[in-house]
Amino acid sequence: MNYEAKEMLLRAKKRKEAKDNIIKLTIANQSLQKHAYLTDVLLKNITKCLPQFVFWKDVDSVYMGCNDNYAHFIGLESSIDIVGKTDYDIDWLECGHTADFFQSGDKDVLAGHPIYNQEEVLSLPNGNKIHTQLSKLPIKGQDGEILGVIGCFTDITELKRKEKEAVKARKEAQIANASRMNFISNMSHDLRTPLTGMLGMAKIISENSLDEKIVKASRYLIESGNILLNILNEIIEINQIESGHLPLKFSEIRIRDIIDEVVSLFKPTIYQKPVSLNICFDPRIPRCLIGDQHRVQRVLLNLISNAIKFTNQGAIHITVDVAKFEENSLTIRLVVADTGIGIDKKDHASIFTQFNRLTSSSSGAYPGSGLGLSIVERFIKDMRGSINLESEILKGSSFICLIPFETLDKNKSNGPADFLFEKEHVSLCPEIQHIDSESLLYDSVLKNKPSKETTLSFEGSTVLLVEDNLIAQLAAKHELEKLHCKVDLAVDGKDAIFKAQKNNYDLIFMDVGLPDMTGFDAIQVIGAWESAIKCDYTPIVILTADASVQKKV
């Protein structure tokens, strides 16, 4: 083959290779165009489906595109119409954000200060204003070069409206709740004052009448009045709990002494029933612990009261033992069990619900407010404890409480005696001390233990009783005169101050709600006068039926 023929073959080969390369490049270009088209369609569809408003600009803040939401938002018919425009081409209202403002924001983003979820109020070209939440970020190429800005914001006007309504509703609820609290506080005074006066009068009749029928009727009146007073107290207490006026108050307490005090309150009721009350107390429990005395007392009062109420015969068992020891604390297991009417399993879940009663008020069998157990559960939870119920119909109920307490620092104690009760003050398991209508073994235990209290004698004491309610005044005076006190009366603050300055009283009982001033004001005046003349301060006891006074003292 000669030289010319070789040249022709080589040129033909090169032409073929060039043609093949063109075909490959064409196919690749078509593929890229198709990919770009699909990407553009996909991007448009994605941005179109988004409920947000999306736009993107180049580094000169010239719009390269947006979704339809944003286009319609600024008054354009289509997202295509925004390409090549700037914010200066959009009729932003002068009273709102301006084009200068938006482009200044773009520059901040391009300078490395992106915006995340920033809330703004936009004034639209149509005159409307909307609340928005805006994010604006830089667009970067593969090499990290900043190519532009992408922005996205959400219309949160409706959310803000609902948020404003919620704030308004919350304020209204707070005002209504405050009104409710004030109403209950006022009613606690307006109801408890005549009620306690009525009970006092009934007691006077019972103690002074020689007619057996009248004595019996007055006792029934006292019993009914006490039931009503207990219901009223529970309503007041749940109101204090919900309003936050019963904060936790930790102090040094003696669990056994609290049990003694609570049980002694129920002795008269227990005597009237063929029911024994059995107590088992773990001697490992320290004499003194750190806890909330009021809550512990109320838990015991409500649980024991319910056990007595719903047990017509049989026994009530109170068990107090150590569930768990820890370094500086221990958990006490308190169980109040009875052989009463029991609770159906279907009612176990709702037994601690406020105002829930398993027997209707119309039956008249077991009066109550339906608040006692809800208060118990709330108080136990406040003390970081728990309560569970085990019960069967006609077999009785057991309420099992686990309550944590802090222990005293042994280095600050007076020795081992602080961690053990006196022998005669402990019911050693498995032996149990009993209280029942025939034998009062528990009473003998209480009588044999050393007395920690000094018996007070009021005989011959001069007392000033400051009370404007005539019935309450007569009832209180009667009780004081039974203690052989000499009683002076005052019906308002001015009279009380005059008599306190004129006479040397051993004790003053001061009602809080007086016609001319509060009892606190009168106390301050008396105290200032005693301080000025440098005489001994007279002990003053506050009298009130107002549930809100506790937070004021």
Image (cartoon, grey):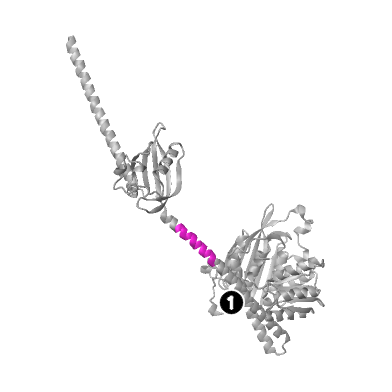
- Which x, y percent locates residue 431? 72, 66
Q: Main secondary structure of the magenta part?
A: helix
Q: Which residue is mark 1?
A: 367
- Which x, y percent locates residue 141? 39, 34
Q: Residue furthest bottom?
A: 211
Q: Secondary structure at mark 1?
A: loop
Of the pair 468 and 204, the residue shown nearer to us:
468
Label 1 sits on what residue type?
A: Pro
Vertical placement of 288 versus 11: above or below?
below
Q: Residue furthest top?
A: 2
Vertical placement of 488 versus 98: above or below?
below
| Residue 184 in the figure: left or right of residue 445 | left
Of the pair 461 and 351, the residue shown nearer to us:
461
Q: Quadrant of the C terminus?
A: bottom right
Q: Quadrant of the N terminus?
A: top left
- Rate crowding at label 1 as few (under 14), some (14 to 19) or many (20 or more) other CA atoms within 10 Å: some
Vertical placement of 1 versus 70: above or below?
above
Please tell me in which quadrant of the rendered image residue 434 appears. Answer: bottom right
| Residue 167 in the figure: left or right of residue 505 | left
| Residue 294 in the figure: left or right of residue 87 | right
Q: Is residue 172 magenta?
A: yes
Tell me the residue at 38%/54% (across/down). 128
- Which x, y percent locates residue 481? 77, 80
Q: Is residue 467 in view from this perspective?
A: yes
Please tell me in which quadrant of the rendered image residue 42 appears. Answer: top left
Tell me the residue at 70%/82% (across/down). 203
Of the pair 345 and 395, the residue shown nearer to us:
345
Q: Is residue 116 magenta?
A: no
Q: Which residues are magenta?
A: 162-176
Of the pair 526 and 116, the residue shown nearer to us:
526
